Image: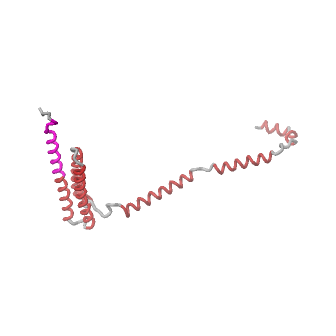
Amino acid sequence: MKNIEDFIRSNKQFFDGEEPSEGHFERFSRKLEIRCSEKVIRRSIVPYLLKAAVVTLLVTLSSLWTWDHFLRPDRNRMALGDVSPEYREVENYYVHQVNFMENEIVNLDLNNSPEQKEILKKEMRSMDSVYVQLQKELKANPNDERIINAMIEHYQTKVDVMNYILDQLRAIRNENQNKPNNGQTNL
């Protein structure tokens, strides 16, 4: 670097005498404008992404708040497990039993007619709507033993009904298995 500076100083007469060619300043100005306009175009996308992330976060939080305070379907209901830990165990037991029996009913699907399946679903929904009503009453009166007992009896009844349905479906399955198939005899 030092050598270049020394060379320029020692040969100053060669550099000072020459003028740039015609239109040099115009070409330089155009190139400078193009570079400046490219810098404007090449803005960073990061601020826009941050703004979009903040808006998304605000919309999500406000949606969750609205759901929790206004739209949540079980807002006016209270589960049996909310009363005490003992009742939570009772509720967990019956929920497990009901889920187990529902799976058994699905597994024992005997190609019943769609009407029969719909009737069964309708009855289960009806039983569930009774339980939802009991949950609402429990929310209004959390220490009412009559409501708690009614909820437990509801679970017991639902388990009994599902047991009956399972027994009937098993009997139908056994009948179908014992029937001879189109003239063939069972050995």
Whether residue 112 appears in magenta in the rendering, the answer is no
Image side of residue 142 versus residue 160, left or right: right
Q: How is the image coloured?
A: secondary structure
Image side of residue 72 versus residue 177, left or right: right
Number of marks in picture: 0
**Quadrant placement of the N terminus:** top right
Residue at the image point whose x is 82% and y is 39% from the top: 8
Percent from the top left, x then y, of residue 7?
82, 37
Percent from the top left, x then y, of residue 145?
19, 64
Q: In which quarter of the image is residue 24?
A: top right
- Span colored in magenta: 162-182
Name the magenta segment's main secondary structure: helix
Q: Residue furthest top?
A: 187
Of the pair 55 and 106, the residue shown nearer to us: 106
**Quadrant placement of the C terminus:** top left
Q: Which residue lies furthest to the bottom in this view?
A: 140
Q: Which residue lies furthest to the front in this view?
A: 183
Image side of residue 83 versus residue 12, left or right: left
Image side of residue 14 versus residue 108, left or right: right
Percent from the top left, x then y, of residue 30?
75, 48
Percent from the top left, x then y, of residue 98?
22, 51
